[in-house]
Every structure is written in C-alpha cells, then in structure tokens.
Image (cartoon, rainbow, N blue to C red):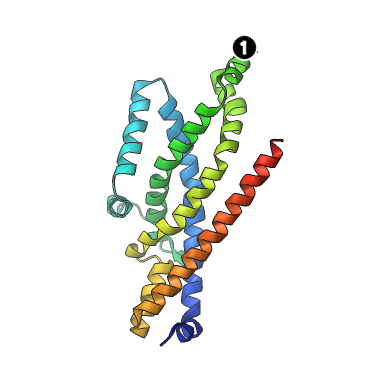
C-alpha cells in the first residue's frame, strides 16, 4: 500500500492519535507549569533544605531519560486504584501515570525558566514594594510574578512545542497517541515506511502550527510593552 491508500483506509487512526497527543501535551504543560512554579520558588528560597530539594529535583529529572522516569512512575504508583474508565478514548488507568511523569519532567525545565524570569525582574521594584509595607509574599505575588510570567510565556510556549514530541514515549504504556496508532497501522499494512512518513509530517505540522502560535503571541506581548 502506498501513502495515499494508507491515509484513505486508516486516516481515523492518525486523527485519533493526533488528538490524544495534543490533549496529553496541553495537560502536561499546564500541570508542569504549576509544579514548575512551586519548584522555582523553592529554588529561590533562602532555606537550605528547600533550596537543596529543588536543586536535587531539577538535577535528577533533567539528568535521567524521560522513558525511565515514565516506567518508574508507572510501577511505583501501581498501588493507586486508578479509575478504569476512558475519557475521549483515553484510558485514565494508563494516562494518569503518563501525565504525572511528563508533568514532573516538564516542571524541572519550566522551574529554571521561571527562576530566570523572576531574577530578571528589576530588584528595585521589589524594594519599592517592600518600602510601602508589602510583605515578601505580596511582593512576589502582585509585583514580581506577573512581570516574570509575561517575560517567560514565549518559553512556556516553546515547552509545549517540545512536549508534543516528547509525548511519543507514552506509546510504551499503551496510550493511543500518534505513535501507538502508527504501530497499529504498520501491523495492519506490513508497510512501515509510509506510516512513519505520515506520522513525521503530522508531528511537523503540529510543531509548525504551535511554533507559529508562539511567535504571534510573542509579537503581541512586545506590542503591548510599547
């Protein structure tokens, strides 16, 4: 079978896999951003214990393969009674460990991005906020974080672009993402090369669209600063 015949007969597998890939990527980036905020604040803490934990977390998660982390989370959390239901065709029993592992990995990178964004905010603004009676927490919440988040949003967008490709590892836990469904089509057609060409083009299109969206958003942010 050629590429056109495979697309005609098995396009729904690729569409379902693409939908799952996008959904998992969005959830992972959102959860990774929230966890990354916490880790970045711990990283900036003057408490040596909290700071040390954040350093250890970032070092371990960035220094080990994502696939290894995925299996560790899956087997380590096997005692949790995950609900055996499906949402949008995704089995939560297998999807939740994937989301946890991917979010933890993403948070390690996002934390460093957020930390650099916080440190890029002029120290004078924090000092001015403290001089008018704001506490350290209020200063961080109302003065520093809004500016830091605005500066790092393009980088968070790039993390989403990266995560679209990174989610391909969840196929090993039986999640029907793009690569898992690609394997189904390969088995059915006994013609792997055209299937991988199709998947590669889909990933490329997703990343081009996401990258274009990040660029447009970044330009709008720059215009709002004028």
Q: Is residue 144 above or below residue 166?
A: above
Point out the image quarter for the N terminus: bottom left
The percent position of residue 84, horizontal first and vertical second, equals 40, 63
The percent position of residue 79, horizontal first and vertical second, equals 30, 52
Q: Is residue 221 above or below residue 185?
A: above
Q: Is residue 63 left or right of residue 145?
A: left
Q: Give the crowd class for mark 1: few <14, some 14-19, many >=20 residues within 10 Å.
A: few
Q: Is residue 20 visible?
A: no
The percent position of residue 181, horizontal first and vertical second, equals 41, 72
Query: Residue at coordinates 36% horizontally, 65% vertically from top-left?
Result: 171
Q: Is residue 200 visible?
A: yes
Q: Is residue 196 above or below residue 172?
A: below
Q: What is the total number of numbered labels drawn onto the structure image?
A: 1
The percent position of residue 35, horizontal first and vertical second, equals 45, 40
Q: Read off the residue under disc 1.
A: 131
Query: Residue at coordinates 56% horizontally, 25% vertically from top-left?
Result: 140
- Picture quadrant of residue 223: top right
Q: Nearer the viewer, residue 194 or 178?
A: 194
Q: Is residue 117 left or right of residue 216?
A: left
Point out the image quarter for the C terminus: top right
Q: Nearer the viewer, residue 130 or 116?
A: 116
Q: Nearer the viewer, residue 214 or 176?
A: 214
Helix, strand or loop at label 1? It is: helix
Query: Residue at coordinates 45% horizontally, 41% vertically from top-left?
Result: 110
Q: Nearer the viewer, residue 33 or 96?
A: 33
Query: Residue at coordinates 53% horizontally, 28% vertically from top-left?
Result: 120
């Amino acid at each position: 079978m050629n590429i056109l015949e495979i697309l005609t007969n098995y396009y729904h597998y690729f569409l379902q896999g693409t939908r799952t890939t996008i959904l998992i990527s969005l959830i992972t980036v959102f959860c990774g951003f929230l966890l990354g905020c916490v880790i970045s604040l711990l990283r900036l803490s003057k408490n040596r214990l909290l700071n040390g934990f954040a350093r250890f977390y970032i070092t371990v998660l960035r220094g080990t393969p994502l696939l290894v982390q995925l299996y560790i989370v899956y087997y380590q959390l096997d005692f949790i009674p995950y609900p055996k239901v499906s949402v949008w065709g995704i089995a939560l029993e297998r999807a939740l460990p994937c989301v946890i592992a991917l979010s933890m990995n993403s948070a390690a990178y996002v934390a460093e991005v957020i930390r650099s964004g916080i440190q890029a905010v002029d120290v004078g603004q924090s000092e001015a906020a403290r001089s008018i009676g704001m506490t350290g927490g209020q200063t961080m919440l109302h003065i520093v974080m809004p500016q830091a988040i605005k500066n790092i949003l393009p980088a968070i967008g790039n993390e989403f672009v990266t995560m679209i490709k990174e989610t391909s590892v969840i196929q090993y836990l039986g999640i029907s993402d793009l690569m898992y469904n690609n394997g189904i089509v390969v088995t059915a057609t006994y013609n792997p090369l055209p299937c991988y060409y199709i998947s590669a083009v889909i990933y490329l299109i997703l990343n081009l669209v996401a990258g274009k969206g990040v660029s447009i958003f970044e330009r709008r942010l720059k215009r709002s600063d004028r």
